[in-house]
Amino acid sequence: MTRPATRADVLATLAIVLLVFGILVGRAALRRAAPRPSAEACAALLDRYVELVLRAANPEPAASQVAERTAMAREAAGERGFVRCEADLTQAEVACALQAGTADDLERCLP
């Protein structure tokens, strides 16, 4: 036999739901308000990612190969640069990614 929910049960449930909602909304608001990276930081991030991906396949890639792949990545990013980076990432995420030792670690820094 089940008992009807008491006022305390309802209030406790409501408090939990509001707390979870508040945390989710608060995190989103903080992320939106966080400083955005510069175009230069985003370009460095793209270069670092290219380098780390190449190093995953070959621990010591030729400088010419790194330069060629970097140029290809920058061309693919287009004239406006790495726009998603500047609009969607935070300075903290880019700083984390630039310090990463592997491509996998870099990707873990990004949302």
Image (tube, rainbow, N blue to C red):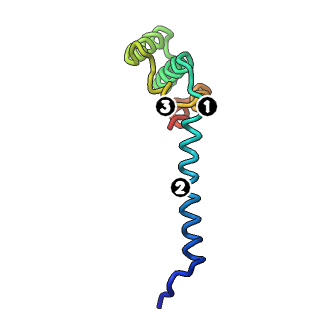
Q: Give x and y (percent) for residue 77.
A: 40, 18
Q: Position of residue 29 (x, y in %)?
A: 56, 42
How crowded pointer 2 is (Cα within 10 Å; few <14, some 14-19, many 20+) is rated as few
Q: How many other residues sit within 10 Å of disc 1, few (<14), some (14-19) or many (≥20)?
A: some
Write down the residue under mark 2: 21
- Pick whichever of labels 2 and 1 is earlier in the sequence: 2
Three-letter residue code for mark 1 = Ala
Element under disc 1: helix
Disc 3 from disc 1: Cα separation: 12 Å
Instruction: Tell me the distance, in whole angstroms, between the alpha carbons under discs 3 and 2.
Output: 22 Å
Vertical position of residue 32 compared to residue 10: above or below? above
Q: Quadrant of residue 75?
A: top left
Residue at numbered disc 3:
88
Judged from the image, the secondary structure of the residue bearing numbered disc 3 is helix
Residue 60 place in picture, x, y as percent: 53, 18
Q: Nearer the viewer, residue 60 or 86?
A: 86
CA gap between label 2 and label 1 equals 24 Å
Kind of residue at disc 3? Asp
Residue under circle 1? 92
Mark 2 lies on a secondary structure that is helix
Task: Decide if residue 83 is on the left or right side of residue 98.
Answer: left
Residue beneath the point at 53% across and 37% down: 108
Amino acid residing under circle 2: Phe
Q: Is residue 101 something one can see in this rendering?
A: no
